[in-house]
Image (spheres, rainbow, N blue to C red):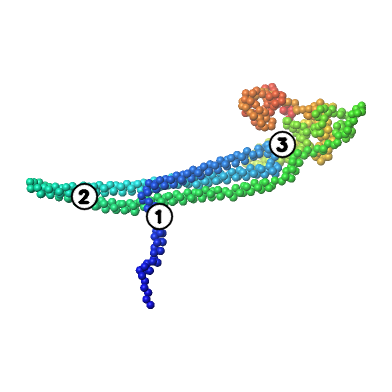
Amino acid sequence: MEFSFSRRDIVRPLKQPTRLIQRTTEQTVLASWSHLQDQFDNLEKHTQWGIDVLEKYIKFVKERTEIELSYAKQLRNLSKKYQPKKNSKEEEEYRYTSTKAFLATLNEMNDYAGQHEVISENMTSLITGELTRYVQELKQERKSHFHDGRKAQQHIETCWKQLEASKRRFERDCKEADRAQQYFEKMDADINVTKADVEKARQQAQLRHQMAEDSKAEYCSTLQKFNSEQHDHYYTHIPNIFQKIQEMEERRIVRIGESMKTFADVDRQVIPIIGKCLDEITKAAESIDHKNDSQMVIEAFKSGFEPPGDVDFEDFTQPMKRTVSESSLSNSRGDGKSEPKFGGKSKGKLWPFIKKNKGAGPEDFSNLPPEQRRKKLQQKVDELNRDIQKEMDQRDALTKMKDVYIKNPQMGDPASVDHRLAELGQNIEKLRLEVQKFEGWLAEVEGRLPMRTEQARRQSGLYEAQNTSAVNSCAQDRESSPDGSYTEEQSQETEMKVPATDFDDEFDDEEPLPTIGTCKALYTFEGQNEGTISVAEGEMLYVIEEDKGDGWTRIRRNEDEEGYVPTSYVEVYLDKNAKDVYKSLQKISE
């Protein structure tokens, strides 16, 4: 069996793979910038545009870091603004669960702000700083490549000019040789020309022909050299330079892409920590216990007083003198005490024992309701016990040191610590007496001991010359249970300080402090806090209490206006006599 194949049948299956190979080769060629050898200026503009884009991105990231820092600063200031002030009433309010949750929120917001600072720092170091250095390197590399490109262009242009000059010279010499040949032929045909002139024309024609041949040889050599240089220029030098420029541009594109990825990663890295901050805020919110807060309100403001009983009916239709039943709120205590006269605004008072205290309260806190007084006394006892423990620890340490000195005299003199030990012993004894005094008051409030004796009242500073007609309030006449409530005797003792004539004024304020000098306001001070007073620059005022080391001076403008101002805001002129009297009064009160 014979098979016949035509040329067409053999070649056809090979055409498709050949086209695929050609397309692949074309794509590879198109991916290179070597075919853009005539677009030198456009490539220069394009690479400059790429650098401008990179610098624009750097500026964008820099502004983002500034926004993050500003936002973090504002968050920190916001958190600081609402933080409770130390040693203030506001700090005491943060014992409730709701305010504790708010405080936790403020702390977490501070940490939240810290994460935005981390974002700013990382973007600055990983993006802005790195790209700024890279841009400088990129500019130097670009400058070098385009310098080489311009140098190559100038070289090929120089070669082209040399070729053109050689070509023009060859053309000129050929024309001169033709003219010389034509002149020789003319002279040779002229019978009137001498043989010498003909010979001269022949030699001139030969010379011009020789010059034309030399120009031709030079032109051929220059042309070959130019073609070689041109081939190297367009197929070697320029493609290499453009390849380097292309690689440089591609590196720039890759670098900006990596920076954008880093931009996202920097944010992504802090998301878990920010989420943790938000989780802590949620946890704090869930820890709020409204029942517990309500109970704390009871513990904070519970006075221990019994509610007053019913008021008896008083019959004014009878001409006889008004009498009061034994259970009446206005019943006087004891046989020898007269019935108090209730006037105007004090007649309807049910809780007259709650006195507004403008200055420092009494040492035994007798100005407070029973329950609050018990808490204050307990706090004072605990505080004194802690002070005693500190002093005892110091004494024990000094005692051990003295024993070491006794055993090893070279380490120190045992007698050197005797003075300090004696001082500590005296301090401990004083503190113990203070503890006994406050424990006595505490026991009295809690009902464990009977009414204090006259001597104890004198020690507390509350015993004064009693008026024959002592003031008795409506609610104080009723006895309370002994479990921390306010007893009849305690109410009577507290009210002994106020004469009956002052009862209508709701316990008038204490006697004003004497003036010990004057002062001049150096600056304007806006007294916005409680206990302070506003003053204007240059204003003259009276000094009633000098600075005790806390930076505040107590002054008075008139009988109704007095308060504290910063000592640095006033210039004080103390009256020496008044100051001595003031110090004497302080010693007596101590």
Give coordinates of residue 589: x percent, y percent.
Answer: 74, 29
Question: Disc 1 marks which residue?
Answer: 30
Give coordinates of residue 238: x percent, y percent.
Answer: 35, 51
Residue at the spot 78% in from the left edge and 31% down from the top edge: 462
The amino acid pointed to by label 2 is: Ser
CA distance for labels 1 and 2: 43 Å
Q: Which mark is residue 427?
A: 3
Give coordinates of residue 333: x percent, y percent.
Answer: 86, 32
Numbered disc in front, either 1 or 2 = 1
Question: Disc 2 marks which residue?
Answer: 215
Q: Secondary structure at mark 3?
A: helix
The amino acid pointed to by label 3 is: Asn
Viewport quadrant of the N terminus: bottom left
Q: Are marks 1 and 2 in contact (CB under 8 Å)?
A: no
In this rendered view, identify the residue nearer to me: 393 or 267.
267
In this rendered view, identify the residue nearer to me: 238 or 524.
238
Give coordinates of residue 544: x percent, y percent.
Answer: 69, 26
